[in-house]
Image (cartoon, grey):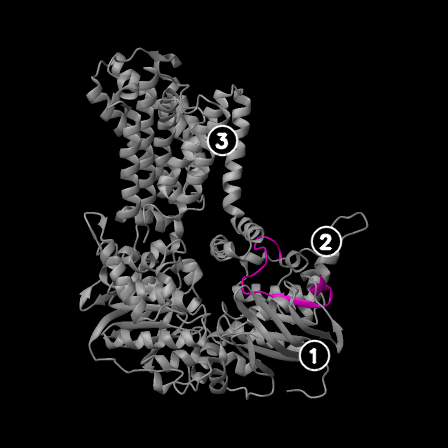
Amino acid sequence: MKRIFDSQLIGPFAAMVIVALVVALTTDRFLNPGNLSNLSLQVSIVALIAIGSTIVIFAAGIDLSSGSMVALLTMILAQLLKFAGLPLTVAIPLILLAGAVLGLVLGLITSYGRIPSFITTLAALIAFRGIALTFNNGSPIFSLDPNLEPLFYGKFLGVPLPFYYLVIFYALASFMMNFTKLGREIYAVGGNPAAAVLTGINVRKVQALTFLIAGFMTAVGAILMSARLNSGSPNYGQTLELQAIAAAVVGGASLAGGRGNILATLMGAMTIVIVQNGLNLNAAPSSVQNIVLGGIILLAVGIDMWRAEISILLAKIFGRSASSSAGGKAATVKEQ
Amino acid sequence: MKQGNTPLWEFVDVSKAYPGVLANDKVCISLLEGSIHGLLGENGCGKSTLIKTLSGVQQPDSGKIYYKGKASQISSPQDARDKGIATVFQEFSIVPTLSVAENIFLGNMPVTRLGVIDWTTVQSRAAAVLAEMEVDIDPEAITGNLSVGEQQLVEIAKAVAMDARMIILDEPTAALGEEEIEQLHGLLRTMRSKGTSILYVSHRLDEVERIVDEVTIMRSGRVVRASGETEINVTEIVSAMVGEDISEHYPKEHNATEEVVLAVQGLKTKNGVTDATFDLHRGEVLGLGGVLGSGRTEIARALFGVDRLTAGQVHLNGQLLTVRNEMDAIKAGLALVPENRKYDGLFFNFRASGNITAASLDEISRLGVLDLGSESEGTKRLIRELEISLQAEQKTVNFLSGGNQQKIVIARWLFSDAEVLIFDEPTQGIDIGAKIAVYRLINALTRAGKSILLISSDHDELLAMSDRIAVVQHGSVTRVVPASELNHDDLVRASAATAEHPATEEIQ
């Protein structure tokens, strides 16, 4: 039904390469190994969380809770390590479990409680940060565990560990979406929930599971966030949920559900981080960074929406040779 | 055909090409005042292109357009409206949350000198329009609360309110029941008598026979029969449309056995099923006859676990069936091909394969991992057997014609090996060639020992393709008779009986 590397990857991949080229040409520091390694560290947390956000979007839901959930989970992790004195090998599985359970609860409220996911997770976005503030009188907790930082800054065979996390989790997610029953059901529920019900798919269960996955991936991101800063804080993860959704959208996932390729989300996240990196290297203020990020999101969705017009334009400019392939694409967009 | 009328609109040698296809090839059509003109043809024959030209959505590449004998043009949808052309599209363009009056004047609201909507005029003129149409609808009612048929009438009221002299109706009865169709036809006759010209596009040939004065038939972009050349009878029309002699419009095979597969007893739900009792035999097609709203679809929903039973029992192969939801029904071997394949049947984000295997993911997976090889093998086999377009393998199903889409929905249940299939309006909105393909599919299924519950508003189809018919009135099955013992009139009379004397009246 789907191939892992399908045509849906071409656009996001091209966007990533173009952005990288532009940044590489405008600054000489972009391609130095230190910066590239820093880049993979920077992208890792948002890209891992975006796996969950994207899968929720595939099932026609939306997850706004991840940023606050990161804050809450870093506080719980800090609490467990510093005050409860638990070893990392116990605390980390507990945090992963906590993330999955929180996600599942949001999923159950959404699917069985019939409250739209936008509302459920908006409420969670607000409430989770509130809960995070109840720990340690709302103050950050520092110096958690000497073995925590290496999880983020450590290297294996000279390559930063977060790079391996990305490879492993994206491989798993891609396998799930393309080769498993659950992946197929997620696309089906997002594509047409009414038809999914009539074909015997347990729509509510599938929806709830997407949020469980999102909660789990948020926990992975939260652990890396704590490791990066060796601390927990109720202020961590601000707007992280929006960056994760932006990565999915720039990667071409349809917010209407049912369409998209999970690997494109990684490229979307890379594109965003490369742009931010380029602006940093060129000493642009953060105000400009935010404006540019907004522009990228609009442009990414715009290009997708206007693909028909753009290919007709290109066909006009480059003559008949382009028209056959462009016509096909134009039709694709129209029908969607 | 009425003589002596001047054509209101006349197209001469109108052509329109899209990249790679000549959609209209020197089409000539002449639309008379006070006449209902049928425009027929299979999907993709160029009907929609012609309608788009007539409603000003697009411009023809060549050819002449005459208005009352004088050369004219229709340069935009606004221009079309100004010249009295109104189009009632298949998909309704009404706003369900607004009142009937508001919908009638939407985009054209009478205003006072201050630019504020003149509600008094809106109400009184809406009432006047509805009265002129001889339609009993409250102008203040919220449109979304009306029946689909009434909504369709509101749609036409919009055209009447703008003084349209030429009304284009594209598949106006696709969503209507027999009674509502009658009401619509009554309205069209009234409008005809007042001199309005009506272009009527429909796949329901039995209707065309009933209402249309003239007929133009198109095939591959050309007019193959102009008005007056063809007798308005179904056999001739079908032959002209398909381009070959169709001797067997309904190729019915009789495969019914005496073995009872599904025994339904005293079915009752809160949703309109009051007392449904019938048996379905192996290899049989049992038709559910009755008007829209008589409870046919509700019986199907109850069997399939969509609505909960409040009383009654269902036995499948002698075993008591407990169906709490759709998943239970499918596991037991039931299948529902829903009425609205667009909204309830297809996954437009999937190709044929994903659509065909959607109800059988357990069968093609081990430990949750899909066997994509067997999926593609099974899909290829069904695409070949059902003569589905080969494009279905590569493209998502939104690119396929309605007939191909319907075959894919049915293929899903062939793949899942369902034992009892419920077909709810399986040929609605698909062209005659695809309809015959669906009939052949029904034959193939019953030959293989499957049993079919058929719901259809097309009485000819229901009578021809069913072995027996269960007449449904007010949610209960009043009697089950061999299809050969019923005729079209019996079914209409049963419908009428329902309307006039609810509860007590039996047919005949």
Answer with the quarter of the image where residue A196 lies. Answer: bottom left
Q: Which mark is residue B119?
A: 2
Residue type, numbered disc 2: Trp
Are the residues tagged 2 and 3 within 8 Å (C-beta)? no
Q: What percent of the width, then of the height, locates residue A231?
A: 33, 15
Query: Residue drawn at (22%, 58%), measured in percent from left and top?
Result: B374
Mark 1 vs 2, N-terminal side: 1
- Reading the image, the residue beneath label 3 is A22
Residue segment shown in magenta: B79-99
Q: What's the distance in space between the residues labelled 3 and 1, CA to CA?
A: 66 Å
At mark 2, the secondary structure is helix
Q: What's the distance in space between the residues labelled 2 and 3, CA to CA?
A: 60 Å
Query: Residue drawn at (51%, 87%), measured in percent from left and top?
Result: B233
Are the residues tagged 1 and 2 within 8 Å (C-beta)? no
Query: Which tag is nearer the camera, tag 1 or tag 2?
Result: 1
Residue type, numbered disc 3: Val
Quadrant of image for the C terminus of chain B: bottom left
- How packed mark 1 is, by other alpha carbons closer than 10 Å (few <14, some 14-19, many 20 or more), is many
Q: Which mark is residue B372?
A: none
Q: Chain of mark 2?
A: B
Q: Which mark is residue B33?
A: 1
| B113 horizontally vs B150: left or right | right
Q: Chain of mark 3?
A: A
Are the residues tagged 3 and 1 within 8 Å (C-beta)? no
Of the pair B205 and B101, the residue shown nearer to us: B205
Query: Which tag is nearer the camera, tag 2 or tag 3?
Result: 3
At mark 1, the secondary structure is loop
> In the displayed structure, would residue B270 be above or below residue B71?
above
Q: Main secondary structure of the magenta part?
A: loop
